[in-house]
Amino acid sequence: MKLFKVFFLALALNAFAVSSALAQSSEEEPKLRLGIIGLVHDHVHWIFNRDNQDLEVVGIVETNQSAIDKFKGRYDLDDSLFFSSYEELMRKAQPQAVSAFNETAEHLEVAAFFLPKNIPVMVEKPLATSYKDAQQMVQLSEKHQVPLLVNYETSWYESTYETKALIEDGTFGKPKKLVFNTGHMGPVEIGCSPEFLAWLTDPVLNGGGAVTDFGCYGANISTWLLDGRTPERVTAVLKQSKPSIYPKVDDDTTIILDYKDLQVVIQASWNWTHHRKDMEVYLNKASIYALDASRMRILDYDSGKEQSHQPASIEAYQKDPFRLLVEVVQQGREIDPQSLYGTANNLTVVKLLELAKRSAELGRTVAWSEL
């Protein structure tokens, strides 16, 4: 439980770091009226621990009484903020956008209700539990021309953007191999809430275990770094290292994405010895190691020297998904479909994950064309 509190303290400090950058803009624009869908995803604490100078939570849709009571007490939330349905939220609170912190399997339901009503939607990663659901969500966004965003913690990292910039610079040559290590000791082990665990460890509501919870990070970033390219083949092993704790889903997954000229390896696990969201990019002339949000190292092959590298600073909207949502709604900031938050990228992510699960189930490599 202490580790879990430390994790959210770090996120709160990140939110505080961008608050000064938001102060000036908040004086020049009205606050975004934001609706929250669900309190059963522990990432929802991000919005309540944020200094919301540029937005106001005008309503919360939740029926889980345990979660409601917990959030009321912790954040001193008024009863008037809570609604039992999307319809009631729309009628009484009139949100300008919604952010979904419910079960991933219910993301399509959220998109199907709000997007036709011209209400932008941001969901927590991944986009959906199935490729079919993901396709429907993207089609709804395109049909109604309403933004649909997918939020990943790694989309806030300076190191993520710096890695992309270093690859595009071309000084180190082309990528030969990408390795992503994501996860932690396990959601039970780090003290996730009972409400979160109830669906996070369910193969239907979450679409899997570590494969979906953490496999999506590597799929998202690699697709972005490779400018939307898709692999020719996918191979995966989904393992249950702790079946007594996670009897229904995988807790330790390895995915190999095979491209014509390189390989991507995604190691997603609830069985690491520590929290990690890091990546290794091996190029012709150097290796780039992004250790966390801000720490990087570069190994130069010619000199044999490995040195620390300071990533360039990024904009406030890149550090904060809610600031990004404000600018999308109020300033018309456009989201590139192949960007980290974009629909095309995240459609690829869900297909990758579905093919990974199919590969593990069949016990063989599967072709991209098999789905």
Image (cartoon, rainbow, N blue to C red):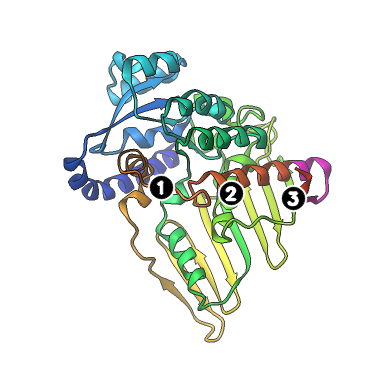
Residue 368: mark in rendering: 3
Q: Residues within 10 Å of mark 1 (few under 14, many from 20)?
A: few
CA separation in Å, label 2 and label 1: 37 Å
Provide the residue designation for mark 1.
Answer: 334
Side (left or right) of 272 relative to 17: right
Q: CA distance from mark 1 to mark 3?
A: 29 Å
Identity, as a three-letter code, of the amino acid under mark 3: Trp
**Within the magenta stretch, is there residue 58?**
no
Q: Nearer the viewer, residue 282 or 369?
A: 369
Q: Secondary structure at mark 3?
A: helix
Tag 2 secondary structure: loop
Instruction: Write the residue at 20% across / 41% down.
Output: 26
The 10 Å Cα crowd at callout 2, few under 14, some 14 to 19, many 20 or more, is some
Circle 3 residues within 10 Å: few <14, some 14–19, many ≥20: some
Going by the numbered disc 2, the residue's amino acid type is Trp
Q: Residue at x 36, y 47 (%)?
A: 333
Q: Residue 89 versus residue 305: which sits nearer the camera?
A: 89
* Magenta range: 358-366
Position of residue 25 in the picture relative to residue 43 (left or right): left
The image's mark for residue 272 is 2
Q: Quadrant of the N terminus?
A: top left
**Between residues 363 and 25, which one lies in front from this camera angle?**
25
Would you identify the image quadrant in which residue 226 lies? bottom right
Q: Position of residue 191 (x, y in %)?
A: 49, 34
